[in-house]
Amino acid sequence: MVQSIDYAALAPALAAAIGALLVVLADLAGAGRRALDGLTLLTAGTGLATVFLLAAEGASRRTFCLSGGGCSYVADGFTLLIQGLVLAAAAIVVLLSSPVLTGDRLPTAEYHFLLLCAVTGAVTLGAARDLITLVVALEVVSLPVFALTAFPGRRPGGAAGRVAGEAALKLFLFSVVSTAVTLYGIALLYGVTGELQLDRLAAALARAGPGEPVAAVLTIAGFAFKVAAVPFHFWAPDVYQGAPVPVAAFLSVVSKSAGFAGLILVLAVGLRPYAETWSVLLGVLAATTMTWGNLVALRQRHAVRLLAWSSVAQSGYILAPLAIAHREPSLAVQATLVYLVIYAAMNLGAFGVVTAVSRRYARNELEDYRGLARSAPLAAAALGFFLICLAGLPPGLAGLFAKIAVFRAVVLGGAGWLAVILAINTVIGLYYYLAWAVRMLGVRAGEPRLAVPFPLGVATAVAAVVTVGLSVAPAGVFGLVPLALPLTP
Amino acid sequence: MSALVPILLAAPLAGLVAVLAAPARAAVRLGLATTLATLAAAVAIAAAFDYGRAGAVQLEVDALWVATIGLSLHLGVDGVSLPLVLLTALLSVLCLVALQQRLPAPGRPKALVALLLALVLGMLGTFVALDLLLFFVFFEVVLIPMYFVIAVWGGDGRRAAAYKFILYTLLGSGLLLVGLLMIYAGGGTLDMVQLARGHGAGMSRGFQIAAFLAVGIGLAVKAPMWPLHTWLPDAHTEAPTVGSVLLAGVLLKMGTYGFVRIALPMLPDGAVAVAPYLGALAVVGILYGALACLGQTDLKRLIAYSSVGHMGFVLLGIATLTPVGVNAALFGNIAHGLITGLLFFLAGAVKDRYGTADIPRLGGGMLAKAPQLGGLLVFAAVASMGLPGLAGFWGEMLALLGAFRPDPSLARTPFLIFMALGGIGTLLTAAYFLTLLRQVAQGAVAQEWRNVRIPALTLSEVAAWTPLVTATVAVGLWPRTLLAITDPAVRALLGGG
Amino acid sequence: MNTLLLVAALIPLCPFAAAVIGMLAGPRLPGGPASAAVTGTAAATALAAYLGLVSAARPETTEGTLTLIPTGGLEIAVALLLDGADLAVLVAFMVCCVALAVQVYSVAYLRGDRRYSSYAAFISLFTAAMLLVVLSGDLITLYVGWEVMGFCSYALIGHYWYDRATSGAAVKAFLMTRAGDVGFLFGIFVLGAAAGSFRITTVLAAVPEMPAGLLVTATLLLLLGVAGKSAQFPLQSWLPDAMAGPTPVSALIHAATMVAAGVYVVARLYPAFWFAPLSLDVLAIVAVISAVGAAVAAFVQEDLKRVLAYSTVSQLAIMAAGLAVGAYQASVFHLLTHGAFKALLFLGAGAVIHAVGSNLMAGMGGLRGRMPITFTGMTIGFAALAGLPPTSGFFSKDAIVEVAAHTAGGDGAPITIWVAWLVYGALLLTVVITAAYAARAWLRVFFGPPVPGHEAPPLMSGPVLVLAVPALVLGFAGLAIPALRPEPGSALITTVAALAGAGVIVHLWRRAPGDDPAALLSPAWWRPVLADDGRDYLDLLYGRAIVRPVLALARMVARADARGVDGAVVGAARGARGLGGLLRRTQAGNAQSYVTGVLAGAVVIVICVAVLS
Amino acid sequence: MHLAYPLVLGALLFSVGVYGVLARRNAILMLMSVELMLNAVNISLVAFDLWRGDAMRGGQVLTLYVIVIAAAEVGLGLAIILLIFRNRATVDVDRLTDLADRDPAPDEGPDRDPVKAAAAGPPGDADPSGATAPEGARSS
């Protein structure tokens, strides 16, 4: 019999995919750089519109279902939030990229095409409920980013060009190895249970014997890589520094969100019977990740590299609530998503300003931000606000609420030790965020006014408005997150 | 009528926005207007406050703000927080008055006034917050503004001091958040009034001890309690006068207020278990602070260490877990706020006039060279030393009385030892203040200043300091004004005492 | 509050108001700062006189409370208490008289001194504090007056603060009395807690039921405060140094009032001491040591004011000894007479110093011709000090010796017998030595080779004469009270002892007029009490055993705080950066090392999970 | 045929692949070893599928996907290696270390002790006096 497909559920993914094709076709038809930007933004916009429509509908839709009831593609609250987050972030990344593309004369069409492909992968991954779709979506997100990372910087063959290649190679090698490990894990899981549907897998695992935890751990390798948790983080600093700044932004938000979505789906849905083991494991991973990330970030001098280590540390904070998923699964996931959303807004804002400054200073050292308060007051104020948000201190209320949400989940879940480590890490984190913010207030003789290109201004402004909105009335965003996790498809 | 408390908080916020929008010239005047409005609101609250039921929380406002983490804008005032609100409003007005006359180093009035108003908002918010997380949010609102006040307008070692201040306090507030959330997990609600009434119901003794330790360390860093105090001397010495006054006058009280409002009523078993250690550290703080003062050569640093000593008495009062002790702590808070605020104003004035706060270089003879300044310095030192008839005496004496008869559930002998050591502490306090007066106020005028004209006190200085002097004398001569307000509230919080 | 209590309340308030006015607008007052100070004290004296007359008619205990201070535990009452035995009223009247005399005397003594207004204000504040101590009905309010009195004494001793030594003496005085006060406060806590209230009437009512041990601790702690304030044995070395202050200050504070406050409080709380015999013994032994030691010290002093200072310590010790042996009325009577004649001696000494220009007796001599009024006044004073009939000193000192004799005989205070005998012997010895140093001082100042000098101005000699009257006749007023009537036997013994002491000195003087009789005495006599530079051993001991180590400890703490505790904090920061540097090395840039790291990490995790589950 | 044989073969192949990735310095050979690892996964999947007798043939469907993924990755991998070769004339992974976490150029000043760094403020001491307090960003 023909399997009925609920296209409405697929709408966001379809929008992104079709958008990608249209970009290529438009390029063939000789569309200008600005038109291509517009088209990509339009795609992201339509995707977002469909997400809001589905969200407005309230009911969760599912399609590609097996006769036995397990469905591969489910568009429920969790998925819609991830898809909304990814599409919004992609729109901002596009805005960030347009001045870089025009400035460095990069092939816009190919750039946007790859970007939209990656977005399609991320959107699908959010909705995937079986291992095959998960792996394929993971790959669809990763592969285009290798190519994006390889886009040469200012002068092809020049310093930036060499570095981009090296970054791409590292990203490629890391991704492929961890994907192989994940696949091997999935193979073992499949061997033990014979199931690929996540919920069916969970049911089967409940009956299975020993040996499964090893397979489970291998499976999460791929997602741990994407999220850049220790020890899968080595790639992050080098790739962020080597890649063009918008791509680094994309890596730090979109691919990280996709990674977290995959991790939550695999763990909270697929491997629920082993909750005790992987919770403790994630707790330890979270603690090491945040501490390692913060400590090394103390010594960084390069702006993007600092943001890379900061995003590694932030991954630690986002992972922390999952450490208590065995006792309070819905509270853990909700806290993780809350932090993820706020982190995305803050981080994109910070990357916006970093991109603007990198237009003037290619080496993008922290030193170059001295005196920014005079050369670009609004940009400096924005970056200062985002950095203090990342540190989790008022006046950056959004960051503070995110911090409180994580602390609340960890303490209510009973992991007191992790809460103490979190407290210590927020202190270490504050030092380098504040050091950077204070540096902008420094005096620098003869610093001409920094002209912030319009799309960059818009991107930073949107991020700022969202962050301030989150600070003042976070209910708006948190309301979106239906507390119930899609435990049963 | 119950909208007074939100108005109290809205005033500095509105002022903050107005100052940022207004031109730099008008900043200081606008700031003064805002603080005066805040003081008016505080006085209105004091007027509307029903002193008959000083124990009950009044003028309550409760509105949900962040649903997911359960944070609600729950504000209210009671006998414990009313005096602190008035003290904060008064000190902020005096700071702005002091700013009228001269701005510290790099000027930039707009930014300084905006930061001060943010500080005022944070401080007032902490005292009127009745929701655990709201208390935490306001507790952290003061960090960034105070950091910038020290880092930008401070003395020469300001950046290291500012970093140490904010990183140390942030670690403390991180632990505080863990403690608050443990209370929330155990007590089931974030509403401080309900939790206080519940007296740690539903929380095992071990849980209460852990929660008390977390909350206690967080608050002790702010108090500051002895081993966690090292940020205080640097922060106070490097902060500009206005910063030091607010830092010493109010920020230190947020820590001890937290103990009285949160730690003691909500975690009684935890309090009983930890109280002797808290008392011991408090007494060490008293003796340590006094001895450190004897060995100091910088005036502002000496006053900072004296704060460690005085807050030692406040913490000793809290450690006794009796209404007498807690009343002593609250009285000590207000008295220390007034007196040390005045001392820092004076230290600032001395530094402006003499160009240095180094005691050997000041050389003495200030009573001859600058009689008004010298006289006020003598007054403030004597008040801080605990001369009866001035505010400093009642806080310390009642703390010793509290230590003499601690809560029945506490072992008595350690507290008798603490009382004795506290007595020796008062002796040492008298010693270092009199040595200070002997080296600075009395004696012959040093050669360096013999033919230098030291300007007399300006109008704005006098205007800024007279309220502090009159308040110190009034509260000292008539302690009933404060004790009648705090006693019923303390009895309510400690569950009938 | 009936009129009696209203009057009682006004007595301390008048000088307090004068002090406040003096401090705020001293120099700008119409009659100058003196007007406010003198009128305030005069008003208080008048009120005290009125109160004395009224309460003499109706001698029952009246008490009134101004307000109650809620502390969460024991309430503090700002209250006044006039007890039946007129103790409070009489002492209050004596304090007011002496204060008035000193205020008037100071107008002339400190003429032209720029800081006179603050001086007068502090004198008024001091008088108010002393009156509060005398009249207070609540122990804590008493303590408030007690402390403010200590501070005023610091301020007045340090009047000439531009001179380093004076401000040092002032600090020393304040810290030693403050050390005593800490014990005093703890004593009040013990009494208050045991009685359930700080009100003196309640405390005294509850004393019989209190356990003996608790009562002894309370009274011993109170004795610590008394020893501090009244410069008794362990804490007496501040009084001689306090002479650095102006002489009228010494007259008021270090002769009549503050030092007497300690003895007054013991008298006021006498039942508490009565039920704690051990504390009476301690009081007696302290009194004995102070009396004899101070008398010997006074004998060898070269500075006239230091002679009178040590004499005060000795006389107070006699009062304390009196209280120890149960001579309640006699001690209070001696307190009154001593207040009169010691103030007289100090004011006279002030006039002499004012005339001669130096404190040292070596620079004085043969002044009886040039300063007749001062000569007559001081002669009466010295006679009263020595206890020669018919001066007031004779009657009060004799009364104490009588009671000491009776108690030694077995009936009287619950004091151990040998201690009573010790007290009796010490009293007689003190009478002899006191007569000796009184005569020595009298001879060296007014006889021998004449020194240029002029009579003190009327404003100074007036008060001297005024005070000479009570010094002479006050004794006869005592005859009204049976206990104070002198018995022929003991009166004879004390007079003979006094004449013996004085006679030896007069004889030595006649043999070698002009040089110091004390020099003829071998140092063996005073070596046990005084070190060679005239400071007593205890003073040196405190200097070396307490002051120096505390300052060293302070410097060590200041350094330790910067290095130790703070070092830990900065060390942590440095450690974090170091660790960051270490971890940074893992990013060596080689892709293969990264992948190795990843796979190694994965293997470690797998092993942990396998082990864990 | 018992399940163990293909599984052991798969495991061996996987280990060889891992060894290849870790030991070989040439990027292309690393690419080949990754392919080995993916093929090892395929073998295991097919073996499990047959052993399980899964009606949906899940294992073999996943194997097809893995083959497609491997192909895509090889394509991209070779393109990247080509790019590096064109830039640096070498594909020796050990020599591609430009992105190491190195201190900036010496003129920047060595890493300093945190206390002095904190005291001097963020590296490159300057008085942070141009303070526009970051009081909540105003959207531009």
Image (cartoon, coloured by chain):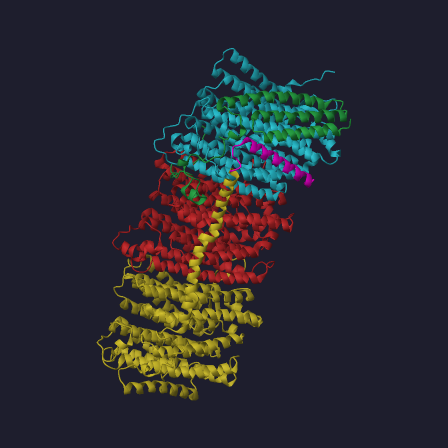
| Range of magenta residues | C585-613
Question: Relative to B13, is C140 above or below?
Answer: below
Q: Is residue D55 left or right of residue B476?
A: right
C293 within the magenta span:
no
Residue B234, percent from left and from top: 43, 48
Answer yes or no: is residue D69 visible: yes
The reply to whether residue C10 is in sight is no
A332 or C284, which lies in front? A332
Between A442 and C5, the one nearer to me in the picture: A442
Type of secondary structure dominating the magenta stretch: helix
Q: Residue A282 at what x, y percent from top left?
A: 62, 37
Rendered shade, chain A: cyan
Q: Which tint was used for chain D?
A: green
Q: Is residue C517 above or below residue B325?
A: below
Of residues A252 and A43, which is closer to you in this image? A252
- Residue B294 left/right relative to A88: left
What residue do we see at 51% from left, 54% from top? B315
Give the chain ID for the red colour: B
Q: Colour of chain C?
A: yellow
Q: Please tell me which residue lies in front, A258 or B83.
A: A258
Give the percent coordinates (x, y) of residue B127: 50, 45
Residue C70 place in picture, x, y as percent? 51, 57
Q: Is residue A449 above or below residue C422?
A: above
Q: Quadrant of the C terminus of chain B?
A: bottom right
